Image (tube, grey):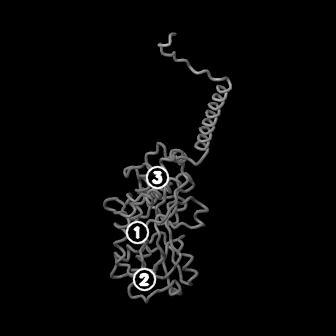
Amino acid sequence: MTEDEPPLDVDPVVPPEERGRTLRLAGWLAAVTLAGVVAAWTIWATGSPTEADLREEARLVGKQELLIGVKDDSPGVALLDPKTGRYEGFDIEIAYMVAAELGFSPRQVRFLAIETEDRGRMQAMDRDGRFATVDLVVATFSVTAERTAQIYMSEPYLETEQTVVTRRDHEDVSSLGDLAGEKACTLATSTSEGKLREARATPVSKNRISECVAGLRAGKYDAVTTDAAILAGFVAKYANELRAHDIGLTTPERWGIATGRNRALRTLVNLALYRSYANPQDRRWEKAFDTYLAPLQQANGRQQVAMAEQPLIDEPDVRRWPWERDVP
């Protein structure tokens, strides 16, 4: 090579000890990366169940029809039109909302009438008079410690309170104690029955609230007591005959959805309620309230029908990827 020729490109000689350090560093980085992947996969594989896992565990995969037990005699809450065979009311809309989140269209939902005493057993009756086990109970079912010790119930979807309804000529009722010695009708196995006994009233238990109201109008009972949201529709319907009394109870009645012994389904129902609560664009709950319960307030005077906001619900423990965390 002459002085005018450019120098040849020659790879620099890397000392053996430098090559060893580079290889060791690369190996260490690979090991750390592999450990991170293994750790992430272990957490993913052994952590909380995914929504898909829950659907399978809840036996929803491949299911073509969702059976839901509902009341059929409560205007504003859940009422069956005998002419059309259609159900309507606040509970019905909540049931449709949850069913949609579970993957069922309105056509795949079948409502069955359920009486108060059968809610815990998840037993409802079809139109042929046969009992069937339902998947969900959305039927003015207050969440209590006693009930949740026996069956799985969701977080509350409505908050109301106990009230008393009388004929319009009855004296003012400011507490259950004012019914002492009087005959008061309520729903069997409801949370109201025990409170009547404590107040030294004479409780009469019925499985259908419409029977209580019919008896009150006929003069068989002095009063009817149960949740305000249940009775509000009757007060509005018979405004010239009945009136509601605010009895000042501070213990709220919070309605939940029963899933029987199906724990995975309970989690999925909570997830559906959480999505409704957390997503400001989801107005299905508000629409149901404004359509069926809010219009009843005027006829019920000072007795609040129900809280006009969906109850707070924490996010259920369902596994999601980090980029899904901001998605309700």
Question: Residue 103 at what x, y percent from top left?
Answer: 43, 48
Question: Residue 101 at what x, y percent from top left?
Answer: 43, 52
Label 1 CA crowd tier, 10 Å (few <14, some 14–19, many 20+): many
The Cα atoms of the two marked residues, 3 and 2, are separated by 49 Å
- Label 1 amino acid? Ser
- The residue wearing badge 2 is 166
With respect to residue 112, does 246 lie above or below? below
Mark 3 vs mark 1: give the one in front: 3
- The residue wearing badge 3 is 326
- Label 2 amino acid? Thr
| Residue at (48, 43) in percent of width and height | 61
- The residue wearing badge 1 is 74
Farthest bottom residue? 171
The Cα atoms of the two marked residues, 2 and 1, are separated by 17 Å
Label 2 CA crowd tier, 10 Å (few <14, some 14–19, many 20+): many
Farthest left residue? 83
Is 17 positioned to the left or the right of 270 in the image?
Answer: right
Return the disc, 3 or 1, that comes first in the chain's sequence.
Answer: 1
- Label 3 amino acid? Asp
